[in-house]
């Protein structure tokens, strides 16, 4: 037995109360085994993982139970001994790359540092091995990426750097906390395939913490389901996910998005289209990108620079009350295209029109007014909300910035917006740290609605959420579209999610749109080989 957790209790204490985060948890992992830990946000998954690593915050402590790793009592281990174990024998792949990567160091140096600290190789060899590890984790052009800083990489690329760092110490146990939630399906499959090979060939074990039941179904030998700090069901992957016994497990399985069966949000989209048809003339498309190209330059070392096309001759439209999905691998150009669509960046060539008005090369004062019509919902609601602001201030800030209304009217608008997104008015006084992930995303949506936009650009808005919260947010977005006639440009790597919310889907690769068609056609008769590759890479064959 490599890891054994018995009767574990974890509590958090502040000046107001003591909260039980983990209660009587039982967990075991043998060598070469993959165990998945699933459950909603706040169920205690991460607290259990951090307790195993002895990385609980100052307010958290283990109050009962035992943790043994390869026969060694981790609860009795000294800080020095724990530093020796972490990275070398137990490695962590965290979810939030932006919080864990050093923004002042090149990513290659951060990978190499782990090799040197744990005396796996010397300085010269570690630099070479860092490039190999970055390639292993799925980063394209690893020699170039190794010289870049975290801010120069996409979110998916940064996550792969964290995976390379975890592999650098050649650990016996990998604690993977949502390791692929930010990755597209093809890279997700490559990374998980590699981790699976490590398990098979080197006897490495893995504790896989995930909200993605499809990933758990494909990759885990056993599954543990947590709710309110307790393990409510455990067993083989097949028995737990295909024949769940606990009502909570059954609800999680039912909420998981699927590639077959009815699309539960279709009725909302039909209602939205019907409401707009009743108004007569719908006007021009909300967004029209025509022959858009965006060229950047990147350093190659010294004074050498290389020109590359992040977006290349892209044409796409989004009509009123329409949801258009944009999918593709990390680095395919999706985020660059989104910035151009939001008038936050100008194309090198081509035109970008909002409500039929060309936004390219406009004076900044005109652009600022046009940006009111397009708002963004980011992947990480915690990163997009100022932790110092109350919910009320976060929602009303756009109104203040544009001089709309007075203090009382803005406060009233904030209450109405919270009601729109299904949050009580009492949430106005809370700060982001006092809310769950799903609640924070609802606040981010309310903030985006404050200026009454015609188009919401949703950049992976549910990828960091558990399946039940994900289902609630998708239902909310569909209802808002039906009620308000909003259009969506929905960026996601999860085709099962896109199928639920979108009317049309555009597939992007290497800066090009290679396929643009309706949802039914794309899933039943894709024309491009890359689209078929994406569909084949989707996890969760057992759940379909």
Image: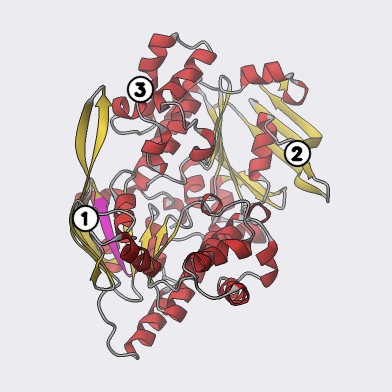
Q: Secondary structure at mark 3?
A: helix
In this rendering, position of residue 239 left or right of residue 356: right
Give percent across and percent down for residue 88.
56, 19
Q: Residue drawn 68% across and 55% down?
A: 434
Among numbered discs 2 and 3, the one appearing first in the sequence: 2
User: Where is residue 30, by image quadrant?
Assistant: top right
- Mark 2 to mark 1 CA distance (whole Å): 48 Å
Residue 534 drawn above or below residue 360? above
Residue 60's tag is 2
Q: Secondary structure at mark 1?
A: strand
| Residue under numbered circle 3 | 131
Give whichever of 236, 9 is nearer the camera: 9
| Residue under numbered circle 1 | 513
Name the main secondary structure of what is drawn in magenta.
strand
Range of magenta residues:
502-508
Q: Tags 2 and 1 in contact by the CB under 8 Å rule? A: no
């Amino acid at each position: 037995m490599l890891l054994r957790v018995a009767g574990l209790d974890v509590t958090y204490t502040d000046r107001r109360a003591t909260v039980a985060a983990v209660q009587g948890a039982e967990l075991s992992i043998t060598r070469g085994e993959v165990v998945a830990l699933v459950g909603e946000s706040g169920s205690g998954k991460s607290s259990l993982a951090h307790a195993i690593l002895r990385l609980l915050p100052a307010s958290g402590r283990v109050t009962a139970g035992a943790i043994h790793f390869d026969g060694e009592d981790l609860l009795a281990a000294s800080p020095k001994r724990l530093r020796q174990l972490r990275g070398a024998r137990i490695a962590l792949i965290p979810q939030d790359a932006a919080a864990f990567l050093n923004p002042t160091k090149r990513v290659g140096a951060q990978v190499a540092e782990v090799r040197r600290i744990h005396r796996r190789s010397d300085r010269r060899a570690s630099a070479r091995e860092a490039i190999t590890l970055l390639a292993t984790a799925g980063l394209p052009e690893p020699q170039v990426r190794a010289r870049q800083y975290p801010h120069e990489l996409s979110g998916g690329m940064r996550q792969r750097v964290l995976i390379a760092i975890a592999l650098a110490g050649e650990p016996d146990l990998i604690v993977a906390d949502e390791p692929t939630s930010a990755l597209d399906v093809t890279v997700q499959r490559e990374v998980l395939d590699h981790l699976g090979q490590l398990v098979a060939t080197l006897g490495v074990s893995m504790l896989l913490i995930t909200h993605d039941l499809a990933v758990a179904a494909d990759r885990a030998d056993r599954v543990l389901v947590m709710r309110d700090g307790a393990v409510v069901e455990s067993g083989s992957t097949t028995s737990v996910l295909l024949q769940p016994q606990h009502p909570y497990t059954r609800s999680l399985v039912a909420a998981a998005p699927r590639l077959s069966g009815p699309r539960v949000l279709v009725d909302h989209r039909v209602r939205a289209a019907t409401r707009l048809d009743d108004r007569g003339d719908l006007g021009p498309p909300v967004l029209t990108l025509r022959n858009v190209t965006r060229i950047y330059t990147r350093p190659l070392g010294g004074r050498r620079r290389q020109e590359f096309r992040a977006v290349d001759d892209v044409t796409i439209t989004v009509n009123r009350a329409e949801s258009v999905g944009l999918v593709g691998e990390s680095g395919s150009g999706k985020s660059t295209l989104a910035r151009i669509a939001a008038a936050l960046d100008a194309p090198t060539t081509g035109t970008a029109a909002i409500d039929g008005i060309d936004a390219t090369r406009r004076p900044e004062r005109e652009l600022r007014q046009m940006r009111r019509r397009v708002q963004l919902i980011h992947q990480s609601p915690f990163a997009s909300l100022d932790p110092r602001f109350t919910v009320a201030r976060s929602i009303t800030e756009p109104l203040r910035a544009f001089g709309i209304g007075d203090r009382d009217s803005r406060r009233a608008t904030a209450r109405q917006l919270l009601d729109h997104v299904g949050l009580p008015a009492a949430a106005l006084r809370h700060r982001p740290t006092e809310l769950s992930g799903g609640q924070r995303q609802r606040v981010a949506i309310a903030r985006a609605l404050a200026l009454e936009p015609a188009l919401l650009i949703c950049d992976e808005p549910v990828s960091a959420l558990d399946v039940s919260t994900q289902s609630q947010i998708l239902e909310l977005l569909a209802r808002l579209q039906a009620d308000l006639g909003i259009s969506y440009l929905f960026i996601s790597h999860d085709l099962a999610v896109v199928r639920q919310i979108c009317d049309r889907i555009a597939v992007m690769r290497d800066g090009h749109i290679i396929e643009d068609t309706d949802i039914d056609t794309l899933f039943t008769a894709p024309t491009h080989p890359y689209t078929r590759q994406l569909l084949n890479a989707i996890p969760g064959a057992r759940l379909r």
